[in-house]
Every structure is written in structure tokens, then in C-alpha cells.
Image: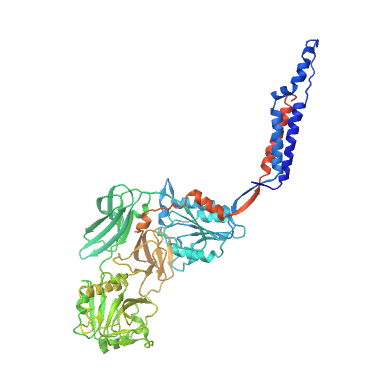
């Protein structure tokens, strides 16, 4: 505490005078008596003892001294210096990811985060303002989202607007993805004085930013058992539903796992999972009458996080895979290899001279091992754009790179594989290191090209997606044993071909993921994942109905509004239901409900105070009001015998 007028304390010198006057003051009272003869003998004693007898009534001088003290304190103008506002601009980021829906003591973590955010808006800088952002943009549109969609309230000094924006923050079912929102923060917080507050239940894997970041922790330990994997598939004459359940508690949990079809019970299992362990449960049966219906799994348990207690997927039938092979190589092993991919393969073969388009084929394979095969590429047209293409030893005749043959070179010498992308799902279990090739081509890949296998000269096998068409290119005659041993290498050759066919087949689905993942269920996605909606001959507008029954327009081929867990339905403009897909959490990191109280409350407060601009607040009114009250009491006490 400081004083703006410390000279006022000289008034305290009046206190001894008040005390002295009180002791020296003589009080005389008038009494009617018949005689004073009895008082004469005590007159001398009275004169000597008067000062000490005044001590019997000290309340009046004490009130007078207290009044003077308070008056002096008020005239000295005391000042309290405390943290008042944040210098520069401030950005509050509220975590509204899936784990913030966890309930604790009747409140969700998101509710606690909102309370913490409301406590911060009183520190708005008059010159900078405060912005409110969330980690998940709950935008119901199908396209066009950008950094601005994370903003709930732009910079403002209006605390009422901020309060309303905080109260309107909605929960989402998507896992945390902090990179986009923190990238946006770096664009809006452009001064060293700007401050960022991040309110969350965990601070793991935070992106690095140059601005001052204050972490506000909410939530604590929570009990949860959740589904972390769901696989639904039709295999020949049966369905298989594999569900993996993880116990995130420290006690053994016993409960029932129920399998349902369109919310009607179908089967169930009793399971017991030890603490911190995972158990898989397999359901299998006759798929008759179940194709195209929603298969869901429910855990018969109550915990703090119900979002991962259920998961669902569409039981897709085995659709035929139509493959067109354009080749005149009668000795190739490729046709038989394609047939062994599955009973649902419909293989058509055509001589390059008779090729006039891919027709309704899902995959077209151009075997360019012969000159005639390479010439067939010239017949490829835009009408075939929905067919996924495989080119084997195409030379310089790739249709999407016509006119750009200067970057294509032929290598007639022996070369070997030096690098493979083992992290890509197509390369899972495939070992091509050391594979030798006698003749190959290499070229500068297009921007959308992705190299899987490389030699010293360049890419040997690469893939890409352009305008909804998937491409796979072998820059050598892969199925000619005189050129390489690729086709006869067991199991590498067949395994790689099967995985490539699976990737191409996934590209024929109506709903496709942006990022290729191994062994995933068709038409089942994770919350927050972008979904490619690929429909042939799509002209009329489309709409998507979300699990909460809200309907949003699909403005592009990529749908990003997967912020809710449940079943999504694709509708045509005339109201016809086209297809459905499901969205699940299936994220062990979110289900773990981890919390990071790495900053104690005292440390957080100290850090905040260090960063806040101090305010000098005068408090002289409070002692002045108290002095006035003491004066009234003293007046009453002095006149109490006369009232």
C-alpha cells in the first residue's frame, strides 16, 4: 500500500493533545444538599486524585483518537496497487474437444472451463481487447472452413459480448487437434505483449508459439471404460464384428457388451477387464438381411465418459469389383493374380487394339509392356475420369502428363531399390529393399504424386489422386520375369498387389477418408475426420443429416462436419435417402481422460500477476466513511445522559 499525501500523518501529533485535555478536564456537577460539613475533610484528597479517577471512563477519548486516526488515514489518500488488466491483446482458447464432455461432480469439464474463462474477461486491456477461440470449430457446413471458424468472439472490450460467447461454446465429439487453432493464434497475436490463455484438461503435445502462454487446468481423475476399436465386415457367408475395449481405471470392471442392429438387440457377451488392460470381443453370425444396416456395440456400464461406450458401423455387402485389363501379354501372371484377390472380382480383358474406353470398370490396368499396350493410353478420355487407373511400364505416354515428356528418361542398365516408404499402408509387410530391375523409366512426379519405391535414378512405383481418380504407376515391366523378380517374389509381390487393389477398391466407395488407413471399416470414420463424398454423375445438390437431426448443405465433395458421434445420412435434393455413414470416437488418448495439473493454482496466479499491468486504486473513501461512523458514535456517547 502506498499514500499519495503522506504529509497528512503530521495530524497524528494532535492525539497526545486530545489525551492530555481529557485528563486535565474538570467536570463539575450541581447537587442540592442540606450541608457541606462532611465534604470539607475530603476536599484535599479529591484534588490529588482527580486525574486518576478520569481513567474510569476511557471510551470517549478512545473514540476521539480512533476518529483522528481514520481521518488522518483518509486524508493521506492510501493507494492499493494490484494486477488489473493485460497489456496488449489477450486470446482465450477454450478446449471443447471430446474429453471435455467428461462429467465430474455433476459438471462437465467444459462447464468448468467456461467458469475459468469468465474469470479472465475482467482483465481486458482497454486498448487491446480480448478474443475467444475454441479448439474445435463446431461448424455445420460441408466446406469452406478456415482459421476464422475457431473464433467465437473477435477482439472486443465488451465483457457482456464475451460472456455470451463463452456461454454459447458448444461441446464437440472430436479429438483434440491443436495445430490449426494455434496457427491462427500466431496470426492474431502479433505483439510481444499479447497474452494467450489456454483452458484445458491436459497440456500434452502443445504446439510451440512465441506469445506468452498461460495454462489454466480444469478437471481431475475420472473413471472410464471405452471402445477403442470397431471393425465390421462381411466375410463370405458370415459377418464379423470385432470390438476392442480398454479399461482406463485401476479396478477390474465386469459388464455386458451388447450387439444391436438398428438399435434392436442381436447378441451380447459378458466381459471382465483387469485394470489398465484391453480385451477384444468378436461377434459373428449369418449376415442375411443385415446388409446396409447399422451395426452398433454398446457397453453396459456407467462411467464419467459416455461418448466411448458405444460405436457403430454400416454392414456393407460385398460389391463386385470390376477390373478391366488392357494387355496383349499372353504369358503375364497378372490376370491370375487379380482373380485371386477375391470372389467378388469381375475381370475383363481387352486387347489394346480393341480398347475404346473403360466403360463401367472400377479399375483399369494398362499393361504397357508392349508397344500396342502403350498406344492404348491415347484412347483414355475424360469420360473415364471416375475409373481408377494402374499403369505398368507406361513409358512417356501417361495421359495426364501428355506434352511433358522432356522430364522422362529411360534407364536400360541394372538398378536396384534403395528406398521404400515403409510408413505407408500400401507398404505394410512389403519388403522391396534390394529388388533389382533391368529396365525402367523415371520422371519428375506431378505435384500430387507420392513416391513409394525409389531407385538411385528416381521413383520406381508411385501413386496419387487427381480429380477423384486414383493413379498407381509402375515405372517398369513389373510382371515380366526377364525384367525383374517382382512378380515371383513370395509373398512380397502378391501382397503388394492385393494392398494396392484394396486401396483402389476403397476409392470406389461413396464415402472415403482423406488419409489412407490400413484395415479400416468402409463408411466408418473417426470424429473430426474429413470425408470425401464421391458420387458419379453428381449434378443435383446434396444434404447431410447429422446425428442430432440437423441438416446441412453439401457444398463440396469434402464434408468436414463430423463433430458428432452417430449415424450420418446423405440425401438428394428431392429428399431421397442415398447412403449412410457412421462416426465414432475410437481414440485411446481421449478416452484416457488424462489431465495435466502441471501448474499449481498459486503458481498460475503468480504468473498471471507478473504479466498483468498493475492498477493504482485509491481507497480513501473507506476510512473516511468509518471515521464518520465513529464520529456519530462519539457524539451519541457524549450526549447520552442528556438525550
Measuring from the top left, give residue 237's x and y in whole percent: 20, 64
Can you tell which quarter of the image residue 505 is in? bottom left
Measuring from the top left, give residue 318's x and y in whole percent: 25, 68
User: Which residue is at 40% across, 56% downward?
Assistant: 98
Measuring from the top left, give residue 200's x and y in whole percent: 45, 55
- Does residue 101 lie above or below 23 as drawn? below
- Frontmost residue, 606 versus 527: 606
Measuring from the top left, give residue 234's x and y in whole percent: 24, 64
User: Which residue is at 56% across, 54% downward?
Assistant: 610
Q: Is residue 7 visible in this depiction of the protein?
A: yes
- Does residue 196 lie above or below 459 as drawn? above
- Frontmost residue, 442 versus 285: 442
- Frontmost residue, 603 versus 342: 603
- Does residue 55 lie above or below 182 as drawn? above
Can you tell which quarter of the image residue 312 is in? bottom left
Horizontal relation, residue 207 to residue 34: left or right: left
How many marks can you see?
Answer: 0
How was the colour assigned to the protein in this rendering?
A: rainbow
- Frontmost residue, 41 versus 416: 41
Q: Is residue 361 visible in this depiction of the protein?
A: no
Screen quadrant of the C terminus = top right
Amino acid at each position: 500500500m502506498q499514500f499519495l499525501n503522506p504529509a497528512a500523518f503530521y495530524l497524528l501529533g494532535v492525539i497526545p493533545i486530545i489525551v492530555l485535555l481529557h485528563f486535565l478536564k474538570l467536570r463539575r456537577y450541581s447537587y442540592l444538599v442540606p450541608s457541606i460539613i462532611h465534604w470539607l475533610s475530603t476536599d484535599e484528597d479529591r484534588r490529588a486524585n482527580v486525574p486518576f479517577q478520569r481513567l474510569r471512563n476511557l471510551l470517549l477519548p478512545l473514540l476521539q483518537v480512533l476518529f483522528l486516526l481514520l481521518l488522518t488515514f483518509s486524508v493521506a489518500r492510501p493507494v492499493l496497487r494490484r494486477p488489473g488488466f493485460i497489456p496488449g491483446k489477450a486470446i482465450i482458447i477454450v478446449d471443447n474437444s471430446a474429453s471435455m464432455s467428461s462429467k465430474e461432480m455433476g459438471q462437465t469439464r467444459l462447464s468448468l472451463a467456461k467458469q475459468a474463462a469468465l474469470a479472465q474477461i475482467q482483465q481486458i486491456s482497454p486498448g487491446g481487447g480480448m478474443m475467444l477461440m475454441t479448439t474445435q470449430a463446431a461448424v455445420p457446413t460441408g466446406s469452406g472452413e478456415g482459421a476464422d471458424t475457431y473464433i467465437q468472439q473477435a477482439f472486443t472490450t465488451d465483457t457482456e459480448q464475451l460472456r455470451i460467447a463463452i456461454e454459447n461454446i458448444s461441446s464437440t465429439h472430436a479429438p483434440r487437434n491443436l495445430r490449426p487453432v494455434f496457427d491462427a493464434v500466431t496470426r492474431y497475436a502479433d505483439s510481444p505483449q499479447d497474452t494467450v490463455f489456454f483452458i484445458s484438461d491436459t497440456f500434452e503435445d502443445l504446439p510451440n508459439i512465441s506469445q506468452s502462454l498461460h495454462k489454466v487446468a480444469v478437471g481431475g481423475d475420472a473413471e472410464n471404460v471405452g471402445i477403442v476399436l470397431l471393425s465390421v465386415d462381411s466375410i463370405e457367408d458370415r459377418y464379423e464384428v470385432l470390438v476392442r475395449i480398454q479399461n482406463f481405471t485401476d479396478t477390474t470392471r465386469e459388464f455386458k457388451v451388447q450387439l444391436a442392429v438398428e438399435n434392436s438387440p442381436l447378441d451380447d457377451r459378458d466381459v471382465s477387464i483387469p485394470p489398465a488392460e484391453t480385451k477384444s470381443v468378436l461377434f459373428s453370425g449369418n449376415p442375411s438381411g443385415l446388409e446396409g444396416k447399422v451395426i452398433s456395440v454398446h457397453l453396459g456400464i456407467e462411467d464419467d465418459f459416455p461418448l466411448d461406450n458405444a460405436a457403430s458401423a454400416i454392414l456393407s455387402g460385398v460389391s463386385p469389383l470390376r477390373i478391366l485389363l488392357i494387355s496383349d501379354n499372353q504369358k503375364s501372371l497378372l490376370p491370375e493374380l487379380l482373380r485371386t484377390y477375391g470372389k467378388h472380382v469381375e475381370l475383363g480383358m481387352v486387347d489394346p487394339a480393341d480398347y475404346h474406353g473403360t466403360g463401367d470398370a472400377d479399375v483399369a490396368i494398362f499393361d504397357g509392356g508392349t508397344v500396342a499396350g502403350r498406344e492404348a493410353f491415347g484412347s483414355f478420355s475424360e469420360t473415364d475420369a471416375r475409373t481408377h487407373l494402374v499403369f505398368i511400364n507406361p513409358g512417356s505416354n501417361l495421359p495426364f502428363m501428355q506434352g511433358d515428356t522432356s522430364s522422362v528418361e529411360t534407364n536400360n542398365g541394372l538398378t536396384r531399390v534403395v528406398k521404400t516408404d515403409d510408413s505407408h499402408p500400401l507398404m505394410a509387410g512389403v519388403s522391396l529393399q534390394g529388388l533389382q530391375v533391368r529396365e525402367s523409366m523415371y520422371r519428375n512426379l506431378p505435384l500430387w504424386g507420392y513416391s513409394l519405391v525409389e531407385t538411385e535414378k528416381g521413383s520406381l512405383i508411385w501413386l496419387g489422386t487427381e480429380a477423384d481418380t486414383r493413379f498407381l504407376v509402375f515405372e517398369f515391366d513389373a510382371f515380366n520375369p526377364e525384367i525383374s523378380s517382382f512378380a515371383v517374389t513370395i509373398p512380397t509381390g502378391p501382397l503388394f498387389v492385393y494392398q494396392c487393389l484394396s486401396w483402389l477398391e476403397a476409392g470406389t466407395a461413396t464415402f472415403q477418408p482423406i488419409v489412407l488407413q490400413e484395415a479400416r471399416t468402409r463408411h466408418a470414420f473417426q470424429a473430426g475426420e474429413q470425408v470425401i463424398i464421391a458420387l458419379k454423375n453428381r449434378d443435383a445438390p446434396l444434404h447431410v443429416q447429422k446425428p442430432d437431426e440437423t441438416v446441412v448443405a453439401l457444398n463440396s465433395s469434402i464434408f468436414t462436419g463430423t463433430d458428432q458421434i452417430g449415424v450420418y445420412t446423405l440425401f438428394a435434393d428431392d429428399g431421397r435417402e442415398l447412403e449412410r455413414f457412421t462416426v465414432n470416437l475410437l481414440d485411446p488418448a481421449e478416452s484416457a481422460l488424462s489431465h495435466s495439473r502441471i501448474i499449481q493454482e498459486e503458481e498460475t496466479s503468480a504468473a498471471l500477476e507478473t504479466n498483468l499491468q498493475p492498477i493504482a486504486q485509491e481507497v480513501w473513501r473507506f476510512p473516511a466513511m468509518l471515521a464518520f461512523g465513529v464520529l456519530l458514535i462519539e457524539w451519541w456517547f457524549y450526549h447520552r445522559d442528556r438525550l
